[in-house]
C-alpha cells in the first residue's frame, strides 16, 4: 500500500512535469530559431543596376554590408527611372518573420534613401500581398555625412495587417522588395529571416486588390476635379470671372458657347498671398489666411462668379438643376511661423514653431488655426447661399508629410475629424516622392490622388507607368499635371498627349478619380485660342473627360491616295510641322520644314532636308529617307529690342521674341508665343495628314512678343506687339511679309527682321545693290555691306557653300527697299545695311541708331524673300 502511494506520487510528479513542459515546447514551436532564408540565394531584378555599380555575385545575399563610402564594392546602384523590384524564390513555402533591406545615403554625390520601400509575399510569384510600405526614418537629401539605414518589416511588431490581424509571420515561397528611385539609390543586403515549414502564427498572404480609387462616396460623387489657382500672389492669375470660368464647368465651342458640361468639381487653391507668403509650405500668417477668404467669398468674388457661370451654362444647356462641386484649400500651417496672429481672441498670437514653444504647444496652436479656418468656410458659405454649388470638402495643401514635425500626422487626423463634423470630405494630392503618400487613409483623408510629376520627368511614359502602378497599389486616384506651355511648345504638348494616352494604357481615363493641375489658365487659353494646336488641347480634354478620347493617329507624310502628278511642289501638315517638297536639282528634292522650335517655340523656318530623286519631277512621298542639310539652330525672323512706354518693370535692354527667351538662353521662360497659324495650298486650307499638290503654299503665323521691360521670369510677361508673318512658298522661293502692330505704346531700339543661319551656305557671302556686287567675304568671319551712307542701295546678299561634287548650295536673301521698314529710314547712316557674324549668321539692319515709336494700334511692316537653289560649278 505504501509502495502504491509512492508510485502514485511519482506518477503525479511526472504528469506535472509533462504539463509544465508542454507550454515550453509549444512556445519553442512558436518562437523557433530564425535564420536568414535569403543567405546566398539568387534573385531577379526588375531592371539591372547601373553597370558602374553592378550586381556581380548576388551582392544582396552574400552577407557583406557596405560601408558609408559609396565606392565600396558591396553596394549595388540604381539610377532614376522606375520603381525597382527584386524577387526572391525560397524554393518552397516557409515561415517568414522579418525582412530587412539596407540602403546608403550620400547627398554629396546624388545618392538618397528611397522614399518608400515596400515588401510583399506570394505563393506563386505572380499575385502579391503587401506586408508593409516603409518610409525613410531619416530626412532624404539631408546635407549631412553619409549614412546607412535599414528598412524593416517585423511580423512580431507590424503583423500582417489587413491579411491576418493576429498573425506574426507570413507563409510564402516568394518575397518581393520594391523601392522608389529619385537620383541614385544604393542597396547592399536584403535579409529574409524565418524558418522552414509552417509555424502556428504563420499565415498565407492574400493577393492585393490593385485598382485606382474610384468616384463614389469618398469623393462626394466627383469624377474630375480641376485645380484653379486663385491665390492672388505674385504671378498668380487675376480674380476669376464668370466668362473665364465658363470653359471649365462647360465645354464651349470656338465661339465660347456651352455645348456640354465639363469638370464636375472645382478646387480653388492659392499658392501665395499678395505679400508673397506661401500657403503650401507654411509661411502665411492669419492676415494672409483672412485675405484669401475675403477674396474668394467677396460680393463679386471667385465663388459668386463660379455660381453665376453654372447658372448661365445651365440655362444655355437646358439643365438648370446642375450643380458643381467645390473643394476649398486649407493652408498648411507649417512649423516655422512664430507670429501667426491671434485666432481665438485671447490676446496672444499663435506660435507654430515647435523649436520655440515646444511641440505640444505648437500643435495646439495649429489646431486652433485649422478649426478657425473650417468654421469660417462653413459660416461664410452658409451666409452666401450659392444655389448651383455644392461645398464638397477641403484640400490639404501639403505635398508630403513632414519629417521634422512628428505631430503633423496628428494635426491632419484632427483636421479630418473637424471636416467630417462639418459634413465635408478631406482631400490630399501628395507628390510622387511625397513622404507617406501611401498612408493617406490612415492619416484621415477620404480621397487622395497621386501626383506622378510626369510632365517634367525625363521620360513621361515611364513615369506614368510607374506612378499608375503605385497609385493602384496604394488605391489612390491620379492627378494629371500640365501648364501653359502645351499651347506653344510642341515638346510640352507631346508630354500632355502622352499623359492623356496613359489614361487609355493604364485605365485611369474611365475608372479613376482624377484631378487636373492645369497651371494658371492653360485650358482657358486653349479654349479661346485661334491657334488650331492650342484649341485642340481643349477639345482633347473634353473627349478625355467624356471617356471618348482616342490616341491621335500618327501623321503620315506618304500619299494615301492619288495626288496630282507633276506638281510644282507638295505640302503635308502634321500638327505644327509643315513640310514642303520641291525639285532642287537633278539629284535631289528639297524639303523646307516649318515647325515650332527654339527658345520661344515660335512657328517658323526650322530645317532643310534633301531626299534623293533623280527623276525630273518632285516626289510626293515625304516619308522616305532624307539627309539634313540645315538644322534648327536659330531664328530666321529676327527678335526685337523694344520697350513699353508705360508700366515697365525696370529690366535692362535685351532682345525678346525670335530665339531669345527670358535670360537670353534657350531654357528659361518665353518672351514670345505663337498665337495662331494657318496653311493654304493654292488658296485651300490644308488639313492634317494629307499630301497636297500646289503651285504655291501660303502660311500665316501670328506671334505675340513681350518687351524687355515687360518680360517676367515665370513666363507671364505682357505682350506689347503682335507680328503677323506671312510666307508664300513656291519651289525654292520663300516670300516673307511681316506686319508689326503695337498692342500699347512702345519704342524700338534695334530690329533686324530678315536674317539667315548660314550653316549649309557657310563658304562665301556676297553683298549686292541690285545686280551690282559691292562687297564679299568668307562667311565665317565678320563682314558687312558697308555703311548706309557709303552703299545706300544695298538690298540683298548671296551665300554659297563649298563644292558639293560639281555644284554649290546657294541662298539669296533680299529685302524690298521700297516698302515699309525696308526703306531704312530708321537706320542711322553710319551703320551697315547688312552684316555677317563669325558665328554663322547674316542680318539686315532695319532699326538701329534711332528710336522710333508706335502708338497702340499703329503698325510697321516689311517684306523680302529667301531663294534656295543649287548652282553647278
Image (spheres, grey):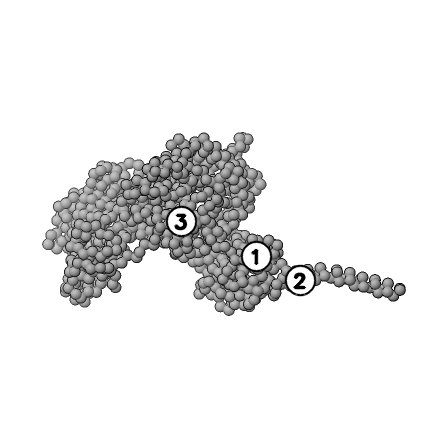
**Marks 2/1: CA–CA distance:** 21 Å
Is residue 806 shown left or right of residue 709?
Answer: left
Q: Which residue is label 3 attached to?
A: 480
- Find residue 762 and report its horizontal and vertical position in percent: 21, 59
From the viewer's perspective, is the residue at label 3 or at label 1 nearer? 3
**Dot 1 crowding, Cα within 10 Å, few <14, some 14–19, many 20+:** many
Residue at (30% x, 46% y) in the render = 535
**Mark number for residue 153?**
1
Marked residue nearer the N-terminal end (3 or 2): 2
Q: Please, what secondary structure does the residue beneath circle 3 have?
A: strand
The earlier-in-sequence mark between 3 and 1 is: 1
Is 120 or 635 nearer to us in this picture?
120
Query: Whole-Å distance between the Cαs marked 3 and 1?
Result: 33 Å
Query: Which residue is drawn at the image coordinates 33% and 51% (left, top)?
Result: 493
Q: Can residue 755 be seen in this view?
A: yes
Mark 3 vs mark 2: in front:
2
Residues 103 and 48: in front is 48
Amino acid at each position: 500500500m505504501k509502495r502504491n502511494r509512492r508510485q502514485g506520487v511519482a506518477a503525479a510528479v511526472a504528469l506535472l512535469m509533462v504539463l509544465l513542459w508542454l507550454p515550453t515546447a509549444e512556445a519553442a514551436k512558436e518562437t523557433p530559431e530564425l535564420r536568414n532564408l535569403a543567405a546566398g540565394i539568387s534573385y531577379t531584378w526588375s531592371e539591372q543596376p547601373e553597370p558602374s555599380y553592378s550586381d556581380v555575385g548576388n551582392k544582396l545575399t552574400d552577407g557583406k554590408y557596405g560601408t558609408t563610402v559609396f565606392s565600396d564594392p558591396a553596394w549595388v546602384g540604381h539610377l532614376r527611372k522606375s520603381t525597382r523590384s527584386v524577387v526572391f524564390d525560397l524554393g518552397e513555402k516557409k515561415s517568414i518573420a522579418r525582412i530587412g533591406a539596407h540602403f546608403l545615403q550620400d547627398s554629396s554625390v546624388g545618392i538618397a534613401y528611397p522614399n518608400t520601400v515596400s515588401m510583399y509575399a506570394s505563393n506563386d510569384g505572380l499575385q502579391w500581398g503587401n506586408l508593409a510600405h516603409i518610409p525613410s526614418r531619416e530626412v532624404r537629401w539631408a546635407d549631412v555625412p553619409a549614412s546607412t539605414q535599414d528598412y524593416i518589416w517585423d511580423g512580431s511588431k507590424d503583423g500582417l495587417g489587413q491579411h491576418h490581424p493576429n498573425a506574426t509571420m507570413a507563409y510564402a515561397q516568394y518575397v518581393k522588395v520594391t523601392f522608389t528611385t529619385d537620383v541614385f539609390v544604393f542597396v547592399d543586403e536584403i535579409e529574409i529571416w524565418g524558418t522552414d515549414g509552417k509555424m502556428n502564427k504563420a499565415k498565407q498572404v492574400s493577393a492585393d486588390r490593385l485598382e485606382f480609387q474610384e468616384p463614389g462616396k469618398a469623393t462626394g460623387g466627383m469624377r474630375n476635379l480641376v485645380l484653379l489657382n486663385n491665390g492672388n500672389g505674385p504671378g498668380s492669375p487675376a480674380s476669376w470671372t464668370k466668362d473665364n470660368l465658363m470653359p471649365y464647368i462647360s465645354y464651349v465651342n470656338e465661339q465660347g458657347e456651352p455645348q456640354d458640361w465639363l469638370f464636375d468639381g472645382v478646387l480653388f487653391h492659392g499658392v501665395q498671398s499678395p505679400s508673397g507668403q506661401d500657403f503650401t509650405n507654411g509661411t502665411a500668417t492669419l492676415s494672409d489666411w483672412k485675405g484669401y477668404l475675403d477674396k474668394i467669398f467677396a460680393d463679386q468674388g471667385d465663388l459668386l462668379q463660379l455660381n453665376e457661370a453654372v447658372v448661365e451654362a445651365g440655362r444655355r444647356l437646358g439643365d438648370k438643376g446642375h450643380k458643381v462641386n467645390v473643394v476649398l484649400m486649407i493652408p498648411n500651417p507649417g512649423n516655422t511661423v512664430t507670429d501667426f496672429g491671434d485666432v481665438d481672441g485671447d490676446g496672444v498670437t499663435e506660435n507654430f514653431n515647435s523649436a520655440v514653444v515646444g511641440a505640444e504647444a505648437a500643435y495646439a496652436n495649429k489646431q486652433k488655426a485649422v478649426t478657425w479656418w473650417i468654421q469660417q468656410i462653413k459660416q461664410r458659405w452658409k451666409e452666401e447661399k450659392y444655389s448651383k454649388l455644392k461645398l464638397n470638402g477641403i484640400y490639404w495643401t501639403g505635398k508630403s508629410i513632414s519629417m521634422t514635425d512628428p505631430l503633423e500626422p496628428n494635426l491632419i487626423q484632427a483636421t479630418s475629424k473637424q471636416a467630417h463634423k462639418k459634413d465635408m470630405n478631406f482631400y490630399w494630392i501628395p507628390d510622387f516622392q511625397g513622404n507617406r503618400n501611401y498612408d493617406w487613409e490612415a492619416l484621415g483623408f477620404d480621397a487622395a490622388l497621386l501626383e506622378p510629376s510626369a510632365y517634367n520627368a525625363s521620360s513621361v511614359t515611364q513615369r506614368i507607368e510607374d506612378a499608375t502602378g503605385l497609385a493602384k497599389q496604394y488605391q489612390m486616384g491620379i492627378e494629371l499635371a500640365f501648364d501653359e506651355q502645351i499651347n506653344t511648345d510642341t515638346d510640352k504638348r507631346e508630354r500632355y498627349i502622352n499623359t492623356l494616352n496613359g489614361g487609355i494604357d493604364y485605365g485611369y481615363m474611365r475608372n479613376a478619380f482624377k484631378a487636373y493641375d492645369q497651371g494658371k489658365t492653360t485650358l482657358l487659353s486653349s479654349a479661346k485660342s485661334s491657334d488650331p494646336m492650342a484649341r485642340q488641347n481643349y477639345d482633347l480634354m473634353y473627349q478625355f473627360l467624356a471617356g471618348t478620347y482616342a490616341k491621335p493617329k500618327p501623321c503620315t507624310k506618304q500619299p494615301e491616295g492619288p495626288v496630282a502628278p507633276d506638281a510644282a511642289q507638295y505640302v503635308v501638315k502634321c500638327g505644327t510641322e509643315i513640310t514642303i517638297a520641291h525639285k532642287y536639282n537633278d539629284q535631289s528634292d528639297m524639303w523646307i520644314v516649318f515647325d515650332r522650335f527654339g527658345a520661344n517655340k515660335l512657328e517658323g523656318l526650322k530645317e532643310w532636308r534633301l531626299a534623293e530623286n533623280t527623276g525630273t519631277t518632285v516626289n510626293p512621298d515625304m516619308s522616305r529617307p532624307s539627309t539634313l542639310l540645315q538644322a534648327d539652330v536659330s531664328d530666321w525672323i529676327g527678335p526685337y529690342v523694344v520697350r513699353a512706354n508705360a508700366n515697365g518693370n525696370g529690366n535692362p535692354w535685351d532682345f525678346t521674341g525670335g530665339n531669345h527667351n527670358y535670360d537670353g538662353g534657350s531654357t528659361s521662360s518665353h518672351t514670345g508665343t505663337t498665337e495662331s497659324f494657318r496653311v493654304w495650298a493654292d488658296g485651300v486650307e490644308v488639313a492634317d495628314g494629307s499630301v497636297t499638290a500646289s503651285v504655291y503654299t501660303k502660311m500665316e503665323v501670328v506671334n505675340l512678343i513681350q518687351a524687355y521691360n515687360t518680360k517676367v521670369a515665370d513666363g507671364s510677361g505682357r505682350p506689347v506687339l503682335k507680328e503677323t508673318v506671312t510666307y508664300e512658298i513656291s519651289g525654292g522661293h520663300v516670300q516673307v511679309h511681316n506686319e508689326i502692330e503695337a498692342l500699347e505704346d512702345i519704342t524700338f531700339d534695334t530690329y533686324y527682321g530678315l536674317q539667315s543661319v548660314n550653316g549649309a551656305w557657310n563658304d562665301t557671302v556676297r553683298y549686292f545693290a541690285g545686280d551690282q556686287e559691292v562687297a564679299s567675304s568668307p562667311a565665317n568671319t565678320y563682314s558687312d555691306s558697308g555703311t548706309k551712307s557709303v552703299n545706300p542701295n544695298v538690298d540683298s546678299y548671296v551665300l554659297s557653300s563649298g563644292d558639293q561634287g560639281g555644284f554649290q548650295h546657294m541662298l539669296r536673301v533680299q529685302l524690298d527697299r521700297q516698302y515699309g521698314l525696308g526703306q531704312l529710314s530708321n537706320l542711322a547712316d553710319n551703320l551697315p545695311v547688312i552684316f555677317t557674324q563669325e558665328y554663322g549668321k547674316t542680318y539686315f539692319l532695319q532699326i538701329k541708331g534711332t528710336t522710333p515709336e508706335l502708338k497702340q494700334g499703329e503698325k510697321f511692316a516689311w517684306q523680302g524673300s529667301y531663294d534656295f537653289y543649287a548652282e553647278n560649278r
